[in-house]
Amino acid sequence: MIRLILIILLLLTSLLTVIKAPTYNLWKLAIAAAEFAWVFIAITIVVLLSGFLAQRYTTTGTVLGLIAIVLFLSPLFRAYDVASHLPKAMDKALGDQSDATPLNLSVIFSGYKEAPVAYKSLPYCGNLHLDFYPAIHPGNHPCIIMVHGGSWSSGNSQDLPELNIYLANHGYHVAAINYRLAPQNICPAPVEDVYQAMEYLRAHAEELGIDTNNFVLVGRSAGAQIALLAAYKQHVQGLKGVVDFYGPADMVWGYSLPASPLVMDSRKVMENYLGGTYSAVPNNYAASSPVEFVNKSTVPTLIIHGEHDVLVAYEHSIRLEKKLQDNGIKHFFLSLPWATHGFDYNLKGPGGQLSTYSVLRFLQNICYEQQS
């Protein structure tokens, strides 16, 4: 009986790889189920074997367990399908070619082979500081500015540092910034902080080894909205492009169709960031929507979003891509059919590998296109 109960629980967990998570806690479990699937597969196999070894098993439990294993494997199967088309799709969108492999099964278990990178905490404006990860090779290098997520009211520069280390190993400086948080500070305060961080990095470029003609903004979730707005709102000297990980790009539309209250009170989150409800401050919503600022001179953009995102609707990225297409802007949209919000928590997982590949391809293209 215990075996059957465990198998049913594992089967229910595996369903999160093919359906959207209905609650906040199940959203977190959905990340684990898809991006750490081998852990759940191993547990399922152990539970199945326990019945055989003890000669106490039921056909029902065995069948359900096998179904769970297939479902846990489904993100990997779909990731390989995306990977089979990804290099050529990026070749076409970016106008270059690469022989790199988007997805490697061995990486899931062994990880990336990287040298450790120690960061320096540098004050850049008042009480704000940034964490600077230097490229492992000497010389001047492009600088990637990381803008963390956290619903505009939480999070910090040390969130998800694995991509920072990965990029430092591939010839990029990374500056992961802190910014002023809501509700004490409303938009555009965080955008202004991005500009201040860039000014600091320009002023200290010689000592830090920064190529000031090659800045790129990367943001996750709320940080993606900040990064996109900073990139699109005005011309920024030396900014070559922006990377949007599952960010809200249309704040007006997003307020009109909020997330499930069982997952997040997204309207309250937006009200805290923008200073009130849409009816009270409609101009703030329009002024904070990156899609409103896309034009013919917008910088190249990489969009990355999972179709099962329950915190920031996938539609945000569809709307942004259409606006970029309409204006003829170089861009690429990496769509992950199984992935939910924050899937890149594990860079070694299927979604983490595909997004990391895409980010590196994009950076190599926009930072070094003149040299090529």
Image (tube, helix red, strand yellow):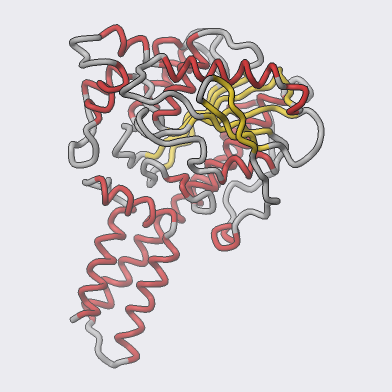
**Image quadrant where one finds the N terminus:** bottom left
The structure residue drawn at horizontal position 78% and vertical position 28%, both measured from the top left corner, is 140
329 with respect to 26 (left or right):
right
The structure residue drawn at horizontal position 43% and vertical position 23%, both measured from the top left corner, is 180
Quadrant assignment, res 206: top right
Q: Is residue 292 above or below residue 3?
A: above
Taking the view exactly as shown, the residue that stands out farthest to the front is: 127
The structure residue drawn at horizontal position 53% and vertical position 13%, both measured from the top left corner, is 328
213 with respect to 156 (left or right):
right
Instruction: In this rendered view, identify the residue nearer to me: 348 or 11.
Output: 348
Q: Is residue 354 above or below residue 255?
A: below
- Whether residue 370 is visible, yes or no, is yes
Quadrant assignment, res 242: top right
The structure residue drawn at horizontal position 69% and vertical position 38%, both measured from the top left corner, is 98
- Whether residue 332 is visible, yes or no, is no
Instruction: In this rendered view, identify the residue nearer to me: 87 or 3.
Output: 3
Instruction: In this rendered view, identify the residue nearer to me: 96 or 344.
Output: 344
Q: Is residue 277 above or below residue 37?
A: above
The percent position of residue 366, horizontal first and vertical second, equals: 66, 24
Instruction: In this rendered view, identify the residue nearer to me: 60 or 366.
Output: 366
Taking the view exactly as shown, the residue that stands out farthest to the right is: 139
The percent position of residue 150, horizontal first and vertical second, equals: 38, 34
314 with respect to 346 (left or right):
left
Q: Is residue 309 above or below residue 232?
A: below
The percent position of residue 43, horizontal first and vertical second, equals: 37, 72
**Image quadrant where one finds the C terminus:** top right
The percent position of residue 68, horizontal first and vertical second, equals: 31, 66
